[in-house]
Amino acid sequence: MTDSPGHPPLNILVVDDEVNIRKTLSVCLETEGHKVIAVSNFQDALAEASRRSFELAFVDLRLGTDNGLDLIPALLTTTPWLKIIVITVYASIDTAVEAMRRGATDYIPKPFTPTQIKLAVQKVFEMRTLEQRVATLQEDLGRAHPEIDFSSTNPTMQRAMNLAHQVASSEATILLRGESGTGKTVLARAIHSWSNRATKPISIISCPSFSAELLESELFGHVKGAFTGAVRDNPGRIAACERGTLFLDEISDLPLSLQPKLLRFVQDKEYERVGDCMTRKADVRIIAATNVNLEKAVQEGRFREDLFYRLAVIQIEIPPLRERPDDIVALAERLLVFHGRSNHRSFVGFTKEALQALREYHWPGNVRELSNVIERAAILCRTDHISMEYLPAILLPGDFAPKIGDPVTIEKIEEQHIRQVLAKTKSLQEATEILGIDQATLWRRRKKYGI
């Protein structure tokens, strides 16, 4: 079998009570390189759809005594992204309209030719590709920060990027290590885009953002009634990124109760949804990230040793920004272009003094903090050069940066503390928890200090 020209093979379900139709469709599709499961009835179709993830289904309208129209919403409940092509000898405008109303993608009357089938599959592939591109663009537009440019003159950073490029095309599980704000999420996206899975979805989960119960449901999915509030089936992120990539950020915060379940999925690609005993399989690559010492977490019993070794097949360490000062100026200039454009401004660059301050600061929040500083300057500056007066006081050299005990107002100390916390955290919710204030209070402080 050879891959179909122009697109990768699909997982396809064929549902028809005529054995000759099942064989004909299977041969036609498998010749094009697709993976086909063919069944004859309603119940077997639902059973197969619950065990594995399909991207396309051919469904006959008459399945013995069952109506194929009723199978359409049932399949979509199990796999919401499934594309369904209805096939029938009883073709009519009414049945075509009803099939589309229930969620079908296309409609082919019997008898059909191999060319019709190939064209229908090509149409589905183009539709899925467009949907994935739109989803990616929407996510990109919704991001608060620009993509981080990983070009670097630092040897450690260059080795990390070379390794990332080298392993991207493999199926190895990857562990990204580095301080908060170094760009681990962006690198995970880049690895996915460089891989053979680039045309498939990438899903990102921040482990600290969920309770243990919600995280399990988010990862593996749940069935209706599994717990209070589970009013409908949820396929979960693993199923949603079939043949794609799942990125688990801050994996050290994964609850101990979930670690055996993730270990099983990493090893065997098997899992169960919450409230369901049926075992499912999924082809999903795992990339994880951490900003803590996982070896120490293993020694302290907070992280399973066997899971650590499964995740750390390939480890990529991203050095902090302070260890590559030569990259700071280039990054700052690229970020100034981005934030200037976002605020409908055009800048020539930085003054000599401002560049020196950027270079000499230790950047505890790494690239995220640098981006925040440049964004603030782009908003406040009214000239074509960013000068010292538009940089936060914490970047000022020597005694100009206020410290606890300095002869400055409490407000000035508060402002600098809030700035540093915001630079080091990924969300306003995380910042409010550290600062011990609510989001409304933080909003008022940011407005007051122009943060």
Image (cartoon, rainbow, N blue to C red):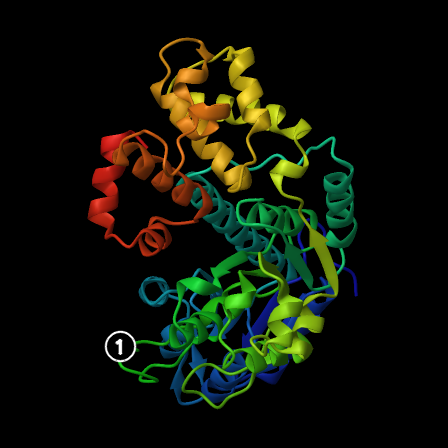
State the image quarter where residue 378 is shown: top left
Tally the numbered discs: 1
Q: Nearer the viewer, residue 403 or 125?
A: 403
Horizontal placement of 97 versus 37: left or right?
A: left
**From what the image shows, is residue 331 above or below residue 423?**
above
Q: Nearer the viewer, residue 213 or 226?
A: 213
Residue drawn at (38%, 19%) of the image = 344
Locate residue 31: give its quadrant.
bottom right
Q: Secondary structure at mark 1?
A: loop
Amino acid type indicated by mark 1: Gly
x%, y% of residue 363? Answer: 54, 37
Which residue is rendered at x = 63% and y = 74% of the image? 298
For the question of whether residue 24 can be seen, the reply is: no
Q: Nearer the viewer, residue 350 or 263?
A: 350
Residue at 70% x, 72% y: name it: 310
Question: Where is residue 175 drawn, in percent x and y?
Answer: 66, 60
Q: Position of residue 420 (x, y in %)?
A: 42, 40
Q: Residue 285's x, y, as percent? A: 64, 64
Task: State the quadrant of the C terminus.
Answer: top left
Camera-nearest residue between 52 and 394: 394
- Is residue 288 depicted above or below 427 in this figure? below
**In the image, residue 101 above or below residue 399:** below
In which quadrant will I find the N terminus?
Answer: bottom right
Q: Kindly identify which residue carries mark 1.
A: 229
The image shows residue 195, relative to residue 355, as above or below, that is below
Q: Mark 1: give few (<14), some (14-19) or many (20+) Cα within 10 Å.
A: few
